Structures are given as structure tokens and as C-alpha cells.
């Protein structure tokens, strides 16, 4: 069995070997090389390789093109999301639409998406239909999730169920898809692949809720700015839950704090006070535990049907690093 | 055998049945319904259906999802190209990025592309790998062509071979791909499908050169504004050929005419005069005849290997409408 570190290294080498930086036209391919070289943990392709290995017992390198397809797809969504979010920087470097321009970021992203689709069907011709169908299902969900995220931002009465469904599609669907694609390539039945997918989606939701939580209540020595989401009026689970539980005066205060021109430091301070008054940290932690618990229950079932332990170990390691 | 008019009607009904206008989230799917309802001849899906019929002899309706995949792909490229070109209108209606906004046009286009890939593999599972590979090859070429078009616009020393290769990728590759996809689905060998593709690409290049020609030398009663490409300094075959043949003073004049602030009417008038001095109309017509001739030669060969006559008749009809 290959370790997750080995699989990450395999992925890195495979992406490097695609040599996007030396393809023509340069303005189309250099941005791909650039965004793929920004530091990242390659969680998604590693998950695909682990799932392939868990099911087939074969050499995970056989699924490298498939694994890289999800990484390229992920980076295509980052390139386009950064345009839509008007984000200047990603992982400490200028975004593609800043370093080049918006047209190049649109088109290079499109090409990356097309390229990723080609990788999906490359090495498992007899399973191409089922893999491509799963891949495009995930692709549609990610687009729907991103649109729902933009819709939620513009909506005054956003609800928690809509928020959870949005993060399921926008971020968790791809984690689930990485596992289901690897499992399907490794000869899983559709039913078993579906359980892999559910496991990944539940963990993905838990991870996103952890991200939400850490923005407001970071662990000791976390180092990142506190309250970035609060300053941006981002509708996270914490804010939506607080608005659900808030009394009239707290709601009025939250509304006032969300007005443009509010001093950022005061905004963070008072929002956090209201979060504390309403026990938002514990409520969020309870929900995260609930999603982890649901995932673990599926994981136990999957341990009887596949070599699942390395997947569980890898995701537990990621979860630990995140909290 | 179904007529091209029948196939167009089948395509329209099949697209309508996808009911994008009633899918959620609305901001993702309504722009798809909108752009797909702009008037259009559905040339690409009809070609796919004709090729499928020519090879398989079976009911072309079997290939409707595949045929619609190329139409959705085409409309995805239009949606994104309109953003990149800052185009306000398409076929008399506001572009998606104007009617909605740029973010919605980016994301709705992405989703349309994902959806089109799902259609490619839907009905021919045993051929999914070969169809998806061909589809993504075309997708990459179209992206490369669009980038080369943007690169050429910014380049002072653009050459004719680069221009021809750009239009081959940007517009002809998809016409070729429509035929090769239909042929592959209809059990063509890879070699035969490649000849279908070449036929479509050669005609696609001829069609684009016809478009270039008609902008400067429209047929009687054409009704469209003359010289739109000239006013925009668009590097068409006509301009590139004129620059290649121009003497020193003509070249100086062309350079002067391309400066910002030149009166549009004078720009068109003087550019056309130089085109006439250099016999550009006849030279372009000769090149168009050459590409048509190359396509016809392949067509003759294909008539021995498939029920090719309806494809030839349909494309001749289109070519006739265009000149």
C-alpha cells in the first residue's frame, strides 16, 4: 500500500510531467502551470488514489490521470471563482486574473476544465461512461453551489438548510466525487461508490463548518486574522445560527454592524460578543461532531467492504490539522 | 432518411425538453435557456445527426443527446466569448453578461460546458471513451483558437498561416468535431471519422473566409453593415493579405487608417480602395475555392464509404446561403 505522502508525490510528478508551461499558446497554458504550482496539499487527487487502491488493491499509479482530473477541475474552479469574488491573491500570490487578465483567466479556466475531462476517460475506457457521468454530475453541483453562494450573499433571509446544501455542493461534492470516482475506477458497484461519495460529502461539510468556526474562534497560535468572514458580512453557519437565535436587540445590533462603514475591529468585537451570548461556538462544534459522526458510521461500514483504513487515517490527519 | 429540416426540429424539441428555464438555481439555468432560444440554424447538431445517420443507417434520434452536446458546447463558447469581446448584443438581443452580469455569464457558461460533457457520454456507453476524448480534443482546440485570436489582435506582425490555423481551431474544429462525433457514434473507424473531421474543418475554414470576404465585399442586397471588421481593425485574411502585398505607401496608409480616431466611413472607403488595388477580393475567392475544393475531394471519397449525399447537400445549401 502506498502512503498518502507517496501518493501526493506521485501526483506532483504527474502534474509536472504535463508540462503546461511549455505548451502553446502560452497565454492559455502558463496560467494553468502557475495555479497548479501554488502550494497545496493535493488532498483531492490523493483521495481518488486512496479510494482506487482501497477497492482494487492494484497499483494506485494506474489512476493517476483520473486523480489529476479532479485536481485540474478544482484549480479551474479556483481560477474562475477568484474572478467572480474579485479576489486579488491566492496562497500569497496574485490570482491569474490579476497576474494576467480576466479574459485569460476565463479562457485558461475553460481549457483546464476541458483538459480535466480528457483525463477522466483516458485510462479506463470500459468505465468511461460511468466515470464521465459522475465527473459531470459533480461539475454541475459545484457550479450550482457557487451560484447558490452568490445568491445567498445577496439574500437577506438566508436559511441554515440552504446554507448547508450550498456548502455540500460548492465544496463537499468534489471531495465526495474524488472518492466515488476512485472507487468506481477500482471496480466498486454503484451502490458502494455512492457510500464512498456520501462519506466524502459529510466530511466535506464538517471541514467547511470547521473553517467557518476557525474564522471566529481560532485555536491558540492559529496565526490567521480573526473575523475575516465577519468583516465581509459573509453568511457563515455561525452568523445564520446567531440570527436564528438572536433576540430583537441582538438582531438589531447585528443589522447595524453589517452596515457599510462600520469600523472592522468594532464589528468583529461586537459580533463575537453576540456569538458568545448565544453559545454559537458550542452549537457549531456540536454540528461539526454530528457530521463527523455520520461520516464515521459510514466509514465503519466501508471498512468491511474495502481496504478503507488508509482513507480514514488520511482524512483524520487532515481534520486534525484543521482544528 | 430524415431531412435536415426534420433533424433541426428534433434538435429544437430535444433542447426544449431539457427545460433549463425551470431548473434551480435560476441564475445558473435561465441564461442557458435564454442563449439557446436566440435564433439559430442548429447547424452543428444537425451535422452530428447527419453523420450518425450516414454511418449507421439507424434512426438519428438515437444521437440526439450527442448532437445537443455540441450545440450546448457552442453556446457555452458564445457566452464566454461575448464577455471576452465586451460584446453588448448577440442576434439582436442583449448578451448574457449584459442581461444578467459577468459572474453569471462565467458560471452559467461553465455549467453549460459541464452539462454538454454529460450529454456526450449518455447514450453510447461502449463508445464513451472515444467520444469524450474527441469532444475534449475539440474543446481544447476551440480554447486555443480563441486565445490565438486574442493574441493575434495584439500582435503587429501576424502572418497568414497563423491566421488560418487560428480560424481552423476557433471555428472550423467544432464543425469537424460535429461530423467526427456523429461518425464515431455511428460505428465509423477512427480513420474514417478523421476524414469526416477533415471535411468539416476544410469547409469551416472556407465558411470563415467567406465571412471575412462578405464584411468587405458583400453580395447585392446583403443588408449588413459593410466594413465592420475594417472599422474594428480586425485582422482578417483580407487585411493580412493586403499587408503582405502592399507597397510602402499602401502600408503607410493602412497603418495610418488603423490609428484610433480615424473617421469610420473614410477608414472603410480607403481600406476598400487599397483592397481593390491589390485584387484582394479575387485572391480571397480563390483561397475559398481552394478550401471548398479540398473538402469536395474528401467528400467524393466519403460518398463511397457512407450515405454521404445528405451531408454534402446540407453543407452546400449552407455555403450557398452564405455567399
Image (cartoon, coloured by chain):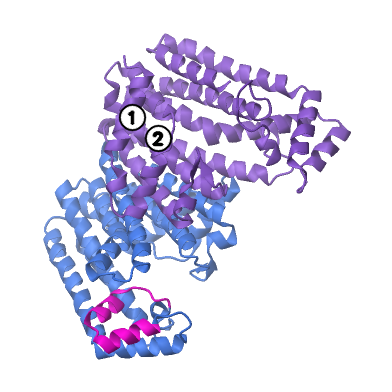
Chain colours: A purple, B blue
Q: For this view, does A246 lie left or right of residue A31?
A: right
Describe the element under mark 1 as helix, strand or loop: helix
- The chain letter under disc 2 is A
At 67% across and 18% down in the image, what residue appears? A286
**Which is nearer the eye, A16 or B94?**
A16
Magenta stretch encompasses residue A245? no
| Region in magenta | B232-257
- The chain letter under disc 1 is A
Q: Percent from the top left, x then y, of residue A230?
A: 70, 36
Identify whether B28 is placed above or below A176: below
Q: Is residue A119 visible?
A: yes
Q: Percent from the top left, x then y, of residue B131?
A: 28, 44
C-alpha span from label 1 to label 2:
9 Å
Q: Is residue B19 visible?
A: no
Q: Which mark is residue A11?
A: 1
Identify whether B202 is placed above or below B219: above
Amino acid at each position: 500500500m502506498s502512503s498518502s505522502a507517496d501518493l501526493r508525490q506521485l501526483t506532483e510528478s504527474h502534474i509536472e510531467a504535463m508540462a503546461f508551461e511549455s505548451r502553446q499558446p502560452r497565454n492559455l497554458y502558463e496560467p494553468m502551470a502557475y495555479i497548479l504550482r501554488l502550494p497545496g496539499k493535493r488532498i483531492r487527487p490523493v483521495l481518488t488514489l486512496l479510494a482506487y487502491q482501497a477497492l482494487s488493491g492494484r497499483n494506485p499509479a494506474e489512476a493517476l490521470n483520473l486523480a489529476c482530473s479532479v485536481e485540474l477541475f478544482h484549480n479551474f474552479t479556483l481560477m474562475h471563482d477568484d474572478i467572480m469574488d474579485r479576489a486579488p491573491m491566492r496562497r500569497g500570490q496574485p490570482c491569474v486574473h490579476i497576474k494576467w487578465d480576466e479574459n485569460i483567466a476565463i479562457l485558461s479556466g475553460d481549457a483546464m476544465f476541458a483538459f480535466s475531462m480528457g483525463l477522466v476517460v483516458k485510462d479506463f475506457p470500459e468505465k468511461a461512461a460511468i466515470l464521465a457521468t459522475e465527473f459531470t454530475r459533480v461539475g454541475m453541483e459545484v457550479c450550482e453551489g457557487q451560484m447558490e453562494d452568490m445568491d445567498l450573499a445577496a439574500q437577506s433571509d438566508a436559511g441554515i438548510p440552504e446554507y448547508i446544501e450550498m456548502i455540500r455542493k460548492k465544496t463537499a461534492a468534489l471531495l465526495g466525487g474524488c472518492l466515488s470516482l476512485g472507487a468506481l475506477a477500482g471496480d466498486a458497484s454503484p451502490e458502494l461508490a455512492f457510500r464512498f461519495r456520501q462519506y466524502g460529502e459529510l466530511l466535506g461539510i464538517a471541514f467547511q463548518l470547521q473553517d467557518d468556526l476557525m474564522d471566529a474562534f481560532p485555536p491558540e497560535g492559529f496565526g490567521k486574522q480573526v473575523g475575516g468572514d465577519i468583516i465581509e458580512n459573509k453568511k457563515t453557519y455561525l452568523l445564520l445560527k446567531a440570527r436564528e437565535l438572536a433576540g430583537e436587540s441582538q438582531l438589531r445590533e447585528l443589522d447595524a454592524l453589517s452596515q457599510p462603514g462600520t469600523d472592522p475591529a468594532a464589528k468583529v468585537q461586537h459580533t463575537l460578543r453576540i456569538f458568545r451570548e448565544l453559545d454559537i461556538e458550542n452549537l457549531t462544534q456540536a454540528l461539526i461532531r454530528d457530521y463527523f459522526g455520520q461520516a464515521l458510521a459510514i466509514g465503519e461500514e466501508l471498512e468491511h467492504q474495502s481496504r478503507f483504513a488508509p482513507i480514514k487515517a488520511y482524512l483524520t490527519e487532515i481534520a486534525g490539522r484543521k482544528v
